[in-house]
Image (spheres, grey):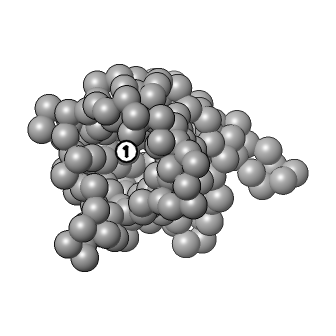
């Protein structure tokens, strides 16, 4: 009888532990990244999108605890390109994203701080682009009832070796790339 009771307690603990952790799969059809690249000294910019190939978000006891997301860099496009002009082929080349060699980028959430009084999250992650991994920090807007998350993030493209092969043109481009991310689970 004692062995049966111990087995029941252990099994109950495993079931409760399993219930406190949950994984949400990314809906890649309803998720996307909008990007904006600007010129340094002009009032001009290029905007476009890039799609996800997969991803997941983990929670523990109802709080976000981690996640990872795969980005299909071969899907990078911009509004001008869709109209027959624009820099998409250049963005896909070796001096920018080199999508033939690095067709996928990745974000892994490494830690999360939750501020319950503000209902806000601060997340830290490792962003890999062109095979280079650098830490990033961001403050997402989380909507659990809709299973949705929005993230605004600026990155310095030069940290990942995303540079123009022409020195004059390189100085004309802002180092910052703005990312507006919609994640639907």
| Residue at image location 31% in from the left, 33% down from the top | 166
Nearer to us in this view, 181 or 159: 159
Specify few, some or many for label 1: CA neighbours under 10 Å numbering under 14, 14-19, or 20 or more. Answer: some
Q: Position of residue 49 (x, y in %)?
A: 36, 61
Which residue extends farthest bottom? 83
Q: Position of residue 6 (x, y in %)?
A: 51, 27
| Residue at image location 28% in from the left, 55% down from the top | 87
| Residue at image location 52% in from the left, 42% down from the top | 174
Residue 90 in the figure: left or right of residue 119: left
Nearer to us in this view, 173 or 14: 173
Q: The C terminus appears in which quarter of the rendering? A: bottom left
Quadrant of the rendered structure where residue 34 is? bottom left
Query: SS at mark 1?
Result: strand
Residue 163, relative to residue 115: is it above or below? above
Q: Which residue is mark 1?
A: 69
Which residue extends farthest front? 168
Residue 53 in the figure: left or right of residue 46: left
Residue 73 in the figure: left or right of residue 48: left
Nearer to us in this view, 182 or 97: 97
Nearer to us in this view, 12 or 113: 113
């Amino acid at each position: 009888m004692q062995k049966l009771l111990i087995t029941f307690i252990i099994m109950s603990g495993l079931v409760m532990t399993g219930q406190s952790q949950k994984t949400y799969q990314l809906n890649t059809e309803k998720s996307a990244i909008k990007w904006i690249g600007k010129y340094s000294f002009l009032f001009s910019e290029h905007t476009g999108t890039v799609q996800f190939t997969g991803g997941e978000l983990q929670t523990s006891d109802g709080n976000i605890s981690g996640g990872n997301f795969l980005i299909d860099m071969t899907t990078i496009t911009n509004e001008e390109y869709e109209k027959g002009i624009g820099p998409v082929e250049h963005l896909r080349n070796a001096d920018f994203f080199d999508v033939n060699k690095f067709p996928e980028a990745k974000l892994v959430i490494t830690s999360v701080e939750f501020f319950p009084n503000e209902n806000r999250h601060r997340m830290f992650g490792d962003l890999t682009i062109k095979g280079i991994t650098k830490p990033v920090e961001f403050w997402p807007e989380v909507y659990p009832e809709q299973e949705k998350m929005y993230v605004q993030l600026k990155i310095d493209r030069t940290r990942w070796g995303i540079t123009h092969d022409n020195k004059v043109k390189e100085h004309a481009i802002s180092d910052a790339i703005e990312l507006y991310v919609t994640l639907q689970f």
